[in-house]
Image (spheres, rainbow, N blue to C red):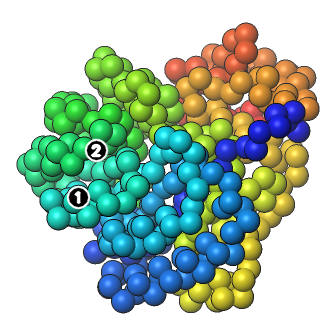
Amino acid sequence: MGQDISPPPLSLYIHIPFCLSKCGYCSFFSLPFSKQSLAQYCSYLHKEKALYRQQLSSPLHSLYFGGGSPALLASEQINGICSGLVFENNAEITIEINPIQLNAQFLSALKTTPVNRLSLGMQSMNAAELKWLDRRHTAAQMQDRIKLCREFGYDNISLDLIYGLPGSNVDTLRYNLDALLALQPEHVSCYLLSLDEDSTRYPEADTLPDEDNQFAQYELIRSTLKAHGFHHYEISNFALKDKTSHHNLAYWNSNNYLALGASAAGWMAPIRYQNAANLAEYYRCVEAGELYPNQSICTKQRMIEDYLMMGLRRIDGIDVKDFKQRFGRDIDTLYAERIRHLVGLGMLKRDKDTLSLTEAALFVSNSVIAELIL
Ligand code: SF4
């Protein structure tokens, strides 16, 4: 394993599963919000945090409040969760926010917390699409709400955009992208809509655009955002200079991250674990003092595969020297045949120090990566 004597960076993910209402396209674990349930949940987060006291004595590289709807947390609850944590200088601390919750009162309370990056679930700037997505904010509100965030000093704002909605095409998407760019975010995450069987919109799955249309939309996103100065640094993510998501890069770089809260999944090499997606079971595990529930201890081969699966999502790909340092193996020897085959097909690029997907492989990345490692 690595020769580096400094400890590997540690990140922390906190999951808040409560939502104001359930969006029809969503298949995440989410529960109806009430102040009492959230307060009880926070008391378990504190107990769970205490279980990982030793691990959390390392300074955190990043902290991410995700959900669900973590902006339902009161500022006192955020500060309570952050208390006792140690942060690296310039640690990135993100919270996901449903735009419907953004107002001066919310932001002034948020300013009392260490949160320094906002990830806004904008999803679309088209009224009909927002309605279909069951989002309760309107496109017209976005400009003023982002302006308000700026007035409160937030200079690192990410916007989520969902593409591939029913009835969408490059023209409807172009409108969305123009409207998004007018909001001047520092970071954009673009997700292709997929409807899982347990989402209430699943019966509409056959109204989604076909693959050619989806691909054309993805290409339009890439070309438009790049033309406006965004660095395409991960399959679905774009950032202005120095505004990449440190937290998500921890995932893609296979760095360690603890995850607290129901359904949260963590990686503390060589342990992969996941808390129960069920409040009663999650509370039971915390009460029982279980560390790393539902864990699997990964073999070196599994760690290599996970590293490739995550690392190849980065547009720069994986650093072959880092691979050798982590695993003591030469990637060109380990995957010689498959790399040669995929390079020949124009799906992988092997530069001096890196192995990466080609542009042609980005939209079909899952199949290409599977072909490499499986
Ligand atoms: S999409 Fe987000 S806000 Fe909507 S139900 Fe799912 S987790 Fe909650």
Residue at (65%, 83%) from the top-left corner? 286
**Residue 18: where, in percent of width, then height?**
39, 75
The reply to whether callout 1 and callout 2 are in contact (CB within 8 Å) is: yes
Residue at (51%, 33%) from the top-left corner? 234
Q: For the residues marked 1 and 2, what is the alpha-carbon distance in whole angstroms?
A: 9 Å
Please say whether residue 258 is visible from this viewpoint.
Answer: yes
The residue lying toward the viewer, choosing from 194 and 282, is 282
- Point out the residue furthest to the top here: 352
What label sits on residue 107 in the rendered view?
1
Crowding near the residue tagged with mark 2, few <14, some 14–19, many ≥20 C-alpha atoms within 10 Å = some
For label 2, the SS is loop
**Residue 84: where, in percent of width, then height?**
56, 66
Residue at (78%, 17%) from the top-left corner? 340
The quadrant in which the N terminus is found is top right
Q: Which residue type does callout 1 highlight?
A: Leu
**Residue 228: where, in percent of width, then height?**
28, 20
Residue at mark 2: 154
Crowding near the residue tagged with mark 1, few <14, some 14–19, many ≥20 C-alpha atoms within 10 Å = some
Left or right: 167 as drawn, with respect to 275? left
Q: Which residue type does callout 2 highlight?
A: Tyr
Q: Can you tell me whether the CB of the residue at mark 1 lies under 8 Å from the nearest atom of ligand 1?
A: no
Left or right: 264 as drawn, with respect to 40? right
* Mark earlier in primary sequence (1, 2): 1
Where is residue 70, by image quadrant?
bottom left
Residue at (57%, 31%) from the top-left corner? 314
Left or right: 364 as drawn, with respect to 306? left
For label 1, the SS is helix
**Residue 140: where, in percent of width, then height?**
8, 48
